[in-house]
Image: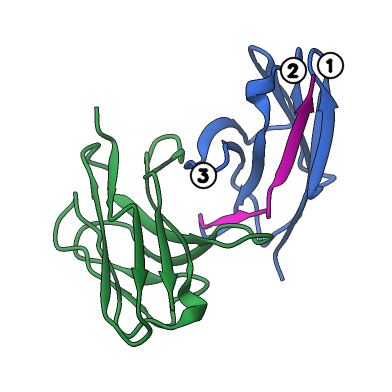
Chain colours: A blue, B green
């Protein structure tokens, strides 16, 4: 079966750095997405990786290793507004998105 | 720019009633999707449509139906609602070039 694993919840301090990991086992791979979802709101796009390596976008970076079935989202200089759930999703061989359950990130002052 | 509009945003419904959740997009995306999101579970695909006139079943299609008469509209119908269909429903469309999904604001449905 297809599976996406990410931690259920993480806590970090304002101003610090946090890394949210995602491991996947899917039938084929056509890219990995990270979405941010604030409580009671819709998910919004953060990043897309299809090749190995690090993609940096401001305070957020996303890393992919296809051979290890592994990705992480790195958030720097954490702000209170970064408190949200972070969803990892993989595009499989049929171009269907397989979603992880999400990681709830709690930022403390 | 509206993007994707869902209606209603919230609804309480008696079991056995019929309900249609509406979804309209103005981005001219070919592909559209309906997901449900439940606490502790990832987004689960109910139905999808790759282009106007075609639809397909997702991971959890039972009890739901969709239609895609044109590019902009993709309504989701619960023919006879049951309490297990209590959930938050998200409509989404995708950019063919990037694969990025754009979500509506969600419809919170409670079936009693």
Q: Secondary structure at mark 2?
A: loop
On whether residue A103 falls in the magenta region, the answer is yes
Q: Is residue A27 left or right of residue A70?
A: left
Q: Nearer the viewer, mark 3 or mark 2?
A: 3
Seen at 70% across and 65% down, the residue is A2
Q: Which residues are magenta?
A: A95-109
Binning the other alpha carbons within 10 Å of mark 3 as few (below 14), some (14 to 19) or many (20 upward) gives few
CA–CA distance in space, label 2 to label 1? 5 Å
Q: Residue furthest left?
A: B70
**Toward which corner of the image does residue A51 lie, by quadrant?**
top right
Q: Are marks 2 and 1 on the same chain?
A: yes
Residue underneath mark 2: A78
Residue B74 location (% of width, % of height): 25, 59
Counting the numbered discs, the total is 3
**Toward which corner of the image does residue A103 lie, by quadrant?**
top right
Q: Which mark is residue A40?
A: 3
């Amino acid at each position: 079966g297809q599976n996406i694993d990410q931690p259920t919840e993480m806590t970090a301090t304002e101003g610090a750095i946090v890394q949210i990991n995602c491991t996947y086992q899917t039938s084929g791979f056509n890219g990995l997405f990270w979405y941010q979802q604030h409580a009671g709101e819709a998910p919004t796009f953060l990043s897309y990786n299809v090749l190995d390596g690090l993609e940096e976008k401001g305070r957020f970076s996303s890393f992919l290793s296809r051979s290890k079935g592994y990705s992480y989202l790195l958030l720097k200089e954490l702000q209170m507004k970064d408190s949200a759930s972070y969803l990892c999703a993989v595009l499989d061989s049929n171009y269907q998105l397989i979603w992880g359950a999400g990681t709830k990130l709690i930022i403390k002052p | 720019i509206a993007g994707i509009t869902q209606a209603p945003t919230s609804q309480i419904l008696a079991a056995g009633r019929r309900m249609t959740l509406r979804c309209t997009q103005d981005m001219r995306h070919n592909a559209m999707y309906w997901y449900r999101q439940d606490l502790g579970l990832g987004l689960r695909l109910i139905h999808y449509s790759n282009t106007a006139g075609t639809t397909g079943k997702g991971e959890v299609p039972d009890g739901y139906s969709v239609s895609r008469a044109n590019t902009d509209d993709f309504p989701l119908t619960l023919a006879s609602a049951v309490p297990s269909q209590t959930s938050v429903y998200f409509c989404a469309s995708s950019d063919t070039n990037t694969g990025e999904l754009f979500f509506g604001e969600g419809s919170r449905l409670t079936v009693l």
